[in-house]
Amino acid sequence: MIKLFKTAALSAVLALGLAGNASAQDINFFTIGTGGTAYTYYPVGGVIANAISKPPGSRECGKGGSCGVDGLIASAVSSRGSVDNVNAIISGLRNSGFAQSDVAYWAYTGTGTMEGSKPATDLRTIAALFEEHIHLVALADSGINSVADLAGKRVSLDEPGSGTYVDANLILEANGLSSDDVTAEALKGGAAAEALRNGKIDAFFVVAGYPTGSLVELASAADIKLVPIDGAGARALTDKYGFFASSDIPAGTYEGVAKTSTVSVGAQWFTSASEDEELIYNITKALWNKESRKLLDVGHAKGKTITPDTALAGVGVPLHAGAERFYREVGLVK
């Protein structure tokens, strides 16, 4: 009797083990490279990761469960930003990632700031997401009222490998300056905000969808201003690079900060051509599922602007075959 019990128990354990292995085999992990945790990419990446995930055992879509991809567990990974994400996708370190449209196009073609680098011809687009604004932040009493006023000042351009670093240098150039004309620092997010408050730097650049968390916190703790990026410098930038557009950050976006003219660029979601077509098709479908709309609308202030209507806006890198199939099915690609 004891022997029979042991055999039955062992069979049950083996059955559970096999079931567990089967479940494990059904799980597919998918990473999304984002940016610094204090900026916009990271929280938006978390919302999208939740929208497209559907681990084994989840409730059914529309019945309190996820409407993501069966068996998929997606995760938002903090990174240095656009350039880092593109490099990680091409090297196979990450499955996907967010990047500014300008950075991605230059990487894909080996032009612009990526001239001399091997073109990242395997880069593919999943979707255009939202508009990012270039913030130039200083203390309200700094006396910095234009990009030209940065000459001789201590300015954080963000880390090399970030899209902010690329764009900050382009903005300096469009205004007749270079990084040699400032004391350049490479601070990110909260570190840059803290350095500004403590007088260790005079200004810093941030490229992010507004409102971005680190600046909301900074504005509540210190009197700051957004320095306009406009006039001849902005026109030179938008004329030379079609990815940039003149745009405003509304008054009140950050406590005590007036409406500010600046330039913007698109944030887009990229992957590799080698990623499975069916998987990317299902991920794209899950992103634009009507149930995902609820998550996007409440998950982040920028989520409401992530819509199918602008899913292909400003796309300069070819669509992944799976994403293209979805957009063709819904009539966005003819």
Image (cartoon, rainbow, N blue to C red):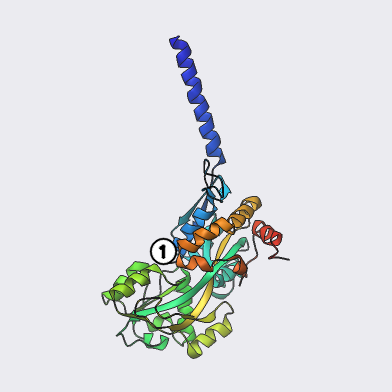
Residue lying furthest top = 1
SS under mark 1: loop
- In the rendered image, the vertical position of residue 14 relative to residue 58, given as above or below: above
Residue 192's x, y, as percent?
34, 71
- In the rendered image, the vertical position of residue 221 relative to residue 289, given as above or below: below
State whether residue 46 appears in this view.
Answer: yes
| Nearer to me, 245 or 302 | 302
Residue type at the position of mark 1: Gly
Q: Name the residue beneath numbered marker 1.
A: 36
Examine the image and state in which quarter residue 250 appears: bottom left
Q: Which residue is drawn at 70% across and 65% down?
A: 333
Residue 190's x, y, as percent?
34, 67
* Pointer 1 local density, CA inside 10 Å: few below 14, some 14–19, many at least 20: some
State whether residue 34 appears in this view.
Answer: no
| Nearer to me, 34 or 260 | 260
Residue lying furthest front = 63
Q: How many marks overall? A: 1
Residue 230's x, y, as percent?
47, 87
| Nearer to me, 166 or 227 | 227
Residue lying furthest bottom = 232
Q: Which residue is drawn at 38% across and 65% down?
A: 38
Q: Image quadrant for the N terminus? A: top left
Residue lying furthest left = 198
- State left or right for residue 158 relative to residue 283: left
- State left or right for residue 313 relative to residue 87: right
| Nearer to me, 82 or 325 | 325
Q: Residue at x 37, y 78 (%)?
A: 137
Q: Image quadrant for the C terminus? A: bottom right
- In the rendered image, the vertical position of residue 233 relative to residue 35, given as above or below: below
